[in-house]
Image (tube, helix red, strand yellow):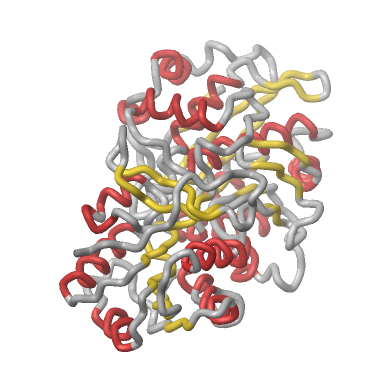
Amino acid sequence: MTLKINPKDHLDRRTLLKGLGAVTAATIALPHAARARGAKTIKIGVISPMTGPLSLFGETDEYTTAKIMELVADGIEVNGETYNIEILLRDAQSNPNRAAELAGDLILNDEVALMLPASTTDINNPTADQCELYGVPCISSNSPWQAFVMPRGGGEAPFNWTYHFFWGLEDVLGTFTGMWKSIETNGKVGMLFPRNADGETWGNEDYGLPPAVRDAGFEAFAPSMFEPRTNDFSAQISTFKANDCEIVGGITYVADLKTFITQCKQQNYTPKVVTVAAALLFPSGIEAMGELGEGMSSEVWWTPAFPYTSSLTGQTSQEIADIWEAETGKQWTQPLGYSHALWEVILDTLKRSSDPLDREANRDALAATDLETLVGHISFADGPHPNVCKTPIFGGQWVEGETWPFDLKIVDNSLYPDVLEPDAQMKPLDWS
């Protein structure tokens, strides 16, 4: 199996190999050594934001791809025939236009049999749109299902080629409010949204967070959306102060949240709760907040405590996380579980396909997925949308760590009480 790397749009080989271990390095260095002679080759396209502002979402993609290469080095068997697997990994550089261009190239020139956009809305949607246009089966994750469906017109009719598994805005609302209700506040929430695809979905006044927050019994104040990478949050902070918002909720990325909370402190705005999606998912993101980061909260989509095992390797979530930390020297991060689960679905789809080189056969197999994975059960049979499967979500708060600077503790399991127990109680922020 080979990993195709375009030096113009990809990290250099030395960076790719760093921290992956000798066995994986040998697999990449000698890509043809373990290929089944004379076997047909299945090409799979992967588009990831390995550089740019969304790179924390793509941090685990190269690592997991290398692990999958090692796992299927001798090919896979489908209907009694052995097929080689060729993964064409591309860096979208956190740019939706580039993601669309790369997807078109992989479809038209490389003739991939399956596509895997591994990131947020800005990468998933333009990739999925190309797959829908050209008839290529596509599986994605890591963004609320509404962000995958609604901007692409999926509310009017199902998609023919593109599928997605993750939780929805209704779930993140239940998780956020579950955490907020455990803290004594005045119930006033300042909503923080960027002017991009994610912000416009999360901030939508019809199906986004603001109306749902109000329906849950809170007051929601949503000032104008901010431009990503702005250096001035005065308008938002002024609105929050004027309305005495003791809670801040929404979605931002790390650099913007860092600027926001720094200016909050400078302008004497000290909320009791800051619960923000995206920016607070990652250890490096919370570390970037410095001492102000302790006590911040976010949704949790995967943790080593998940009780699920890999259908590919039999490893537990804890084992997957432990190996990541040992090999990379980095703390576990939430996308790791989904990076692995996406490959579980991909390989399961191919093994069940009537012809793994035929896109339509692969699409039919993908639609019929019924699989236990590292992030839970994946099936599109009874989702909120024909192309969607929902997965578990919890509420987490960052506290001072033991081995690492911060640890993410589960503080709310209201939506999935049978999956995980909380391991801490939510506490208010202390910016004194």
Q: Residue at position x 24%, y 75% from top? A: 269
Place of residue 351 in the rendered image (x, y in percent of width and height, measured from the top left): 75, 29
In this picture, residue 205 sits left or right of residue 274: right
- 256 with respect to 310 (left or right): left
Q: Position of residue 24 (x, y in %)?
A: 45, 19
Q: Is residue 27 toward the left or the right of residue 56 in the image?
A: right
Give the quadrant of the C terminus: bottom left
Residue at the location (23% across, 63% down)? Answer: 431
Q: Nearer the viewer, residue 42 or 205?
A: 205
Residue 28 position by quadrant: top left
Q: Residue at x 52, y 60 (%)?
A: 121
Q: Is residue 340 above or below residue 385?
A: above
Residue toward you, 234 or 353: 234
Displayed quadrant of residue 20: top left
Instruction: Answer whether residue 271 is visible to the viewer in this image.
Output: yes
The x, y position of residue 72, in whole percent, is 61, 21
In the current view of this chain or complex, which residue is farthest to the bottom?
242
Vertical arrangement, residue 107 with respect to residue 404, above or below: below
- Viewer-side residue, 380 vs 135: 380
Residue at 41% in and 53% down: 397
The N terminus: image quadrant: top right
Location of residue 378 with respect to 83 vertically, above or below? below
- Picture coordinates of residue 342, whole percent (x, y): 60, 40
Instruction: Farthest residue to the left: give it.
Output: 266
